[in-house]
Image (cartoon, grey):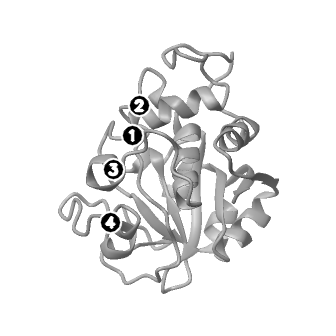
């Protein structure tokens, strides 16, 4: 999906992190605008990740962020296979447990009484995987992402993608494309949007809550 506010990343740059040039060339996952190789973002789909797939944007984003930060979690599947629906189900389920959203040994159960996740849950999961997660204001996160840091942003998904939807959603941002748009990997639209560039202002307009910077 492309709007005047978005510029999809080129297949070649997006797939640099996936290790398979030409993935899904006809599926709409990536588009053809040239982009700077300023990002290690990958595509991971929250769909097909178990009974909580509808609320797994948080742990899926944590997996994407860890890979982009150079610390792929256990059971992460790279390349074309990992980008498919359910291709990284095990890694996302493991992340649910690391975040404290599901009990150890049973990712099909819930350990919390709320929908989705909080940033603090994701920060716990990232730290459990030996990386640093620093809570930040949303605007600080956008600035950091534009400078090349890996950042999980809590956005209003409908505003972000131009749809009539009212819910919070986690995405991962890092780097910029050749037009200066900030690159975002969206686990909720992995097969249709994948990695896309948004203007700084559009991201700011899409704020739902805070951000966390992963390193």
Q: Marks 2/3: CA distance?
A: 12 Å
Circle 3 sits on which residue? 83
* Few, some or many residues within 10 Å of mark 2 (<14, 14–19, 20+): many
Give the Cα separation between the discs numbered 2 and 4: 22 Å
Please indicate, yes or no, whether residue 129 appears anywhere in the rendered image. yes
Q: Are marks 3 and 4 in contact (CB under 8 Å)?
A: no
Mark closest to the chain's N terminus, 1 or 4? 4
Q: Which of 161 and 99 lies nearest the eye of the viewer? A: 99
Say which element carries label 1: loop
Q: How many marks?
A: 4
Give the number of the mark in front: 1 or 4.
1
Residue count near mark 3 (Cα–Cα under 10 Å), binned few <14, some 14–19, many ≥20: many
Question: 30 or 1: which is nearer to us?
Answer: 30
Dot 3 falls on a residue whose secondary structure is helix
| Labelled pair 2, 3 in contact (Cβ < 8 Å) | no
In the depicted structure, whether residue 193 falls above or below residue 8: above
Report x, y in % for residue 140: 79, 66
Q: Report, in whole angstroms, how far the alpha carbon at label 1 lies from the one at label 4.
A: 19 Å
Residue at which label 2 appears: 49
Marked residue nearer the N-terminal end (2 or 3) = 2
Question: Sequence-wise, which precedes: disc 1 or disc 2?
Answer: 2
- Tell us which disc is closer to us: 3 or 4: 3
- In whole angstroms, how far apart are the C-alphas of marks 1 and 3? 7 Å
- Label 1 with label 2: CB-CB less than 8 Å: yes
Q: Which disc, if any, is residue 88?
A: 1
Q: CA distance from mark 1 to mark 2?
A: 7 Å
Reading the chain from its start, which is encountered first: label 2 or label 4?
4
Name the residue that disc number 4 marks: 30
- Residue drawn at point x = 60 percent, y = 39 percent: 167
The picture quadrant where one finds residue 87 is top left
Disc nearer the start of the sequence (1/3): 3
């Amino acid at each position: 999906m492309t709007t005047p506010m978005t510029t999809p990343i080129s297949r070649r740059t997006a797939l640099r992190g996936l290790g398979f040039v030409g993935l899904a060339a006809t599926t709409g996952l990536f588009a053809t605008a040239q982009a700077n190789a300023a990002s290690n973002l990958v595509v991971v789909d929250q769909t097909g990740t178990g009974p909580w797939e509808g609320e797994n944007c948080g742990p899926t984003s944590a997996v994407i962020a860890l890979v982009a930060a150079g610390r792929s979690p256990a059971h992460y599947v790279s390349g074309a296979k990992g980008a498919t629906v359910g291709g990284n189900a095990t890694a996302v389920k493991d992340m649910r447990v690391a975040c404290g959203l599901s009990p150890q040994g049973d990712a099909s159960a819930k350990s919390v009484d709320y929908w989705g996740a909080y940033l603090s849950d994701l920060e716990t999961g990232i730290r459990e995987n030996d990386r640093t997660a620093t809570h930040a204001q949303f605007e600080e996160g956008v600035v950091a992402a534009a400078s090349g840091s890996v950042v999980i942003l809590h956005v209003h998904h409908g505003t972000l993608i131009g749809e009539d939807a009212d819910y919070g959603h986690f995405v991962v941002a890092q780097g910029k494309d050749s037009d200066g748009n900030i690159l975002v990997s969206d686990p909720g639209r992995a097969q249709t949007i994948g990695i896309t560039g948004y203007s700084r202002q559009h991201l700011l307009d899409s704020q739902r809550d805070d951000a966390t910077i992963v390193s």
